[in-house]
Image (cartoon, coloured by chain):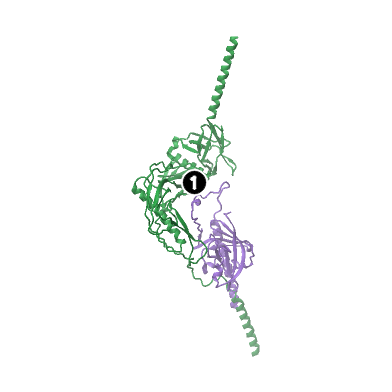
Amino acid sequence: MERKQGISAILIMICFIMCMMNIFQTVSAAETTSITLKCYDEAQDIILSDMHWNLYYLGTIEGERFTYSREFSGYQDTVLLEDLTASELTDFASTLKNYILHDDITPTQTGITDEGGEITFFGLESGMYLLTAEKLKIDYRSWKATPSIITVDAKRSDNVVSIAKVRDATLDENETKYAVRKIWMKNKEEAQDIKQIRNPSITVEIYRNGELFETQELSNANNWQYSWIDTTGAEWYVIEKEIPRYYTVSYRDNITEYVVLNTVQPQYRDSSVIWEEPEETTTMATLPPGIIGTETSTTPPDNSTTDIGTTTTPKTGNFTGTTTEVYPFTNETETSTTNETDSWMTDINSSTASSHDTASSTRTTVTTSTKTGSGSGSSNNSKTGTGSGNTGNSTPGGGGSGNTNYSGGSSGNTTQIIKLPQTGQLWYPVPILAGGGILMMYLGVKLGRKED
Amino acid sequence: MISALSLCVYNIHEDQKGGEQAQLILEEIKAEIPESTETATEKKYDLFSEYETEPVFTEAVIAIDDAIYIGVICIPDLGIELPVMNEWSYPNLKIAPCRYKGSYLDHNMIIAAHNYRSHFGRIGELNSGSKIIFTDITGKDYIYEVNNIENINGTDIEAMDFGSAESWDLTLFTCTLSGQSRVTIRANQVEEREGK
């Protein structure tokens, strides 16, 4: 009896151990997943085998929060991932690819596609991955794959299948023209892309087959664009040497055209505003943030019904409000703050002046009113990582003097053409001449007969 | 009589010469107009065009024998295909139709030509709905349909310009036999297409 109980206990123990082992194995299997990539040129019905792919682990995703991995942490301030559309996600991938090449980041895994044009990467943790491929050359043809971002969750799926986006990259056998262009962008929150804070020029490094080919300055002088010619069909990418302050960078290309996008990043600061009653009534099309006003429509002097402009009169009297400034500023020194504010005000002034040009029928003079802004403590600078608040000394919309006069239409200068071009051959004299000739012949014959 | 006869011979000779010269120029232009190099897979996308805040469209031109040409005009119903010169002048009009005013890019181009049978002499035979195809130097086709045919007095410049961009996109004109008026064809653009 005791023997039977002992055997039963041992069997139960073995079963328990096996169950525990099974559970651990199950947990271990759920912690990794795989990505299968399929590569083919759908339009030409060509399977792309022997295409070399690199896989990079970018970071973790928890809910909506993305955190760069250690290898890519250096790009967190300049290559942002937030609420990106599908095409913006592609740009994000292309941008990181450029940095991978430039900074020689080691891939997490590499491999080549098999005869069926497929490649699988195994043993992947949950997170976000970047996949890039080297250009595939077969005879005189070549294909290039767009870098792609794939997010995997090992708990939900043990394999993710993705179709690689490939394009025919076969170039003209003659020389090919390449070009790089710099674009300044304002961001989605419509923060002003203030021209005054743009660098007067930027420098791009052009890489050919991984080696620095050329360094080129882009500025207004060359329309922020540079072109070059190459006959070798090499692989190119560009890197902006120093990303301008207050901007992030994104790279796009279509094999021969390269775009460097700098998008301004809004910087937020809450500050209190005290608006002192101005000496004269002011009107402006755009009020400084936090200033309350009443809108007035203006109509042209000819009393047409079309509302051609709206101006806003700031509320007079002293009041205190809170404004969230949504434009780049600096926290460094009071002097530089003033300069930043001045440049902001210049922008407001210019926009005010331009909007007045077409609108008002009355002569308006905007005077600079005194305004004291006091910064209250903290600034919301999560995007840039700088912390302290600052005193905001700013002068309000002393928007430039508005000499605005309604003018109804413009008279153009036209070249005086007296007559339309004569585009006819001289056919009309023919019947006249022929008729005259016949008449003269008839008269001649008749006169001759008379004499006879 | 002899004068009348001489004038006839001269006009016929000029007509033929104008036609031959235009055809020679046409062959040269057609040789220069590129064929589409797009592969069957994917048209090469113009990345920069996305960032043109104010799209800059410029006409492509080609120089042949010290003259500038902007494209080729084809009127299938009349069986004519002729080069179009960039600027009009009386010497230019003897060679080929000339742009009198406007641009195909702005939908207000006016083309003038002599009333040679080999040039615009028969445009009065066109009907509403007749097709006119203008091909620019890049090979892009602008296809128009005739919507109005009128005679405009030779001194009425305003009437020739009238209605541009609203009523018509292309105008062709030439002299009537009397030389006093202009046979004027108005057409609307119905299609644009890339080169063959």
Locate the C terminus of chain A and report the quarter of the image it occupies: bottom right
Q: Which residue is mark 1?
A: A253
Quadrant in the picture for residue B127? bottom right
Q: Is residue A270 above or below residue A447?
A: above
| x 59%, y 10%: residue | A3
Give the chain coloured purple: B
In the foreground, A51 or A334? A334
In the rendered structure, which amino acid carries the disc numbered 1?
A: Asp
Q: Secondary structure at mark 1?
A: strand
Q: Is residue A54 visible?
A: no
Does B183 sit left or right of A361 as displayed? right
Does A207 sit left or right of B194 as displayed? left
Give the chain coloured green: A
Categorize mark 1 by other alpha carbons within 10 Å: few (<14), some (14-19), many (20+): many
Q: Position of residue A92 (x, y in %)?
A: 48, 42
Quadrant in the picture for residue A422? bottom right
Q: Position of residue A117 (x, y in %)?
A: 57, 37
In the foreground, B161 or B40? B161
